[in-house]
Image (cartoon, rainbow, N blue to C red):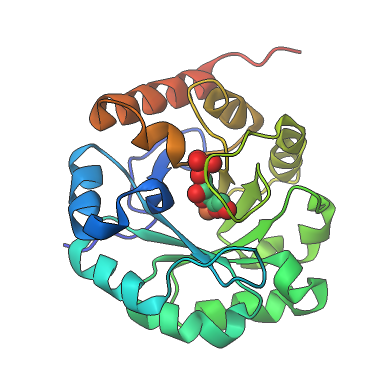
Amino acid sequence: MERTASDTASSTVGPPIVIAPSLLSSDFARLGHEVRRLEAAGADWHHVDVMDGHFVPNLTIGPPVVAALARVATRPLDVHLMISEPRRYAPDFAKAGAHVLTFHLEAVGEQHARETATAFRDLGISTVGISINPDTEVERLEGVLDLVDLVLIMSVYPGFGGQAFMPEVLSKTRWLREQGFRGHVEMDGGLDAETLPLCVAAGANALVSGSALFKAPDLAAEIAHFRDLAEGARTAPRRS
Ligand SMILES: O=C(CO)[C@@H](O)[C@H](O)COP(=O)(O)O
Ligand SMILES: [Fe+2]
């Protein structure tokens, strides 16, 4: 049976912990194999980084590859659109089988964020997401939070895997929870065993990791370790 993005393990303390390996760090010559390997290792979502060479200075994959991934995946495809025209291409990604579809605020501006989120929803996207870059103020999301299921806080400048985590963005995650945002808060960029607990303690539940996970000698053990660290950081008493 097909899984939906909200179909992960239940939790009484907000959205469930979601471990979302970034396929950007996988072996592109064997994507089907990588998807099966990640699922066997316990991944919750597959994070798919879409870059257009314009919004970010890199090019990756498009709808045909997402459609190919969807034929193999039994876990949700978490599609992160780092593209200048998300509305133009959203129908193709919805048709390809994206479950989570996230656009960047910087690509559309506040004035078009609500209509973009609504357009994604009208395409049948079950989990509509919006993302902000490290230099974008989180308060700019205030007018759209009621329309989205997920906010993706970039903890590196978008475009490439393997960059260092930027701890200064953690306050954005805390701000979202202080506003009462109850959807997924995803953090993306530079997450590893040291930085992931900081994200969860700040209020994040969806955790993207590319290079740190894929360079681990035992992928299943590393995903289990990340999950333990996340659950521990979530239940740990907050320090004042
Ligand atoms: O969106 C992006 C980069 O733009 C990410 O999803 C990266 O792919 C995460 O990779 P690591 O920083 O974990 O290596
Ligand atoms: Fe990403």
Decide which of 209, 236 is in the foreground and name it.
209
Residue closest to the eye, 5 or 63 = 63
- Residue 6 left/right relative to 40: right
The vertical placement of 29 against 188, above or below, is: below
Q: Position of residue 121 (x, y in %)?
A: 52, 77
- Quarter occupied by the N terminus: bottom left
Near-viewer residue (60 or 224): 60
Q: Position of residue 72 (x, y in %)?
A: 19, 63
Give x and y (percent) for residue 30. Answer: 22, 56
Q: Is residue 57 above or below residue 34?
A: below
**Residue sitting at 33 percent across and 60 percent down?**
4
Write the residue at 39% across / 66% down.
Answer: 99
Q: Quadrant of residue 83?
A: bottom right
- Quadrant assignment for the C terminus: top right
Q: Is residue 144 above or below residue 17?
A: below
Horizontal side of residue 195 vs 238, given as left or right: left
Tell me: 210 left or right of 183.
Answer: left
Q: Is residue 100 left or right of residue 150?
A: left
Q: Quarter of the image holding residue 188?
A: top right
Q: Is residue 74 visible?
A: no
Say which residue appears at 72% left-offset and 53% top-offset.
Answer: 133
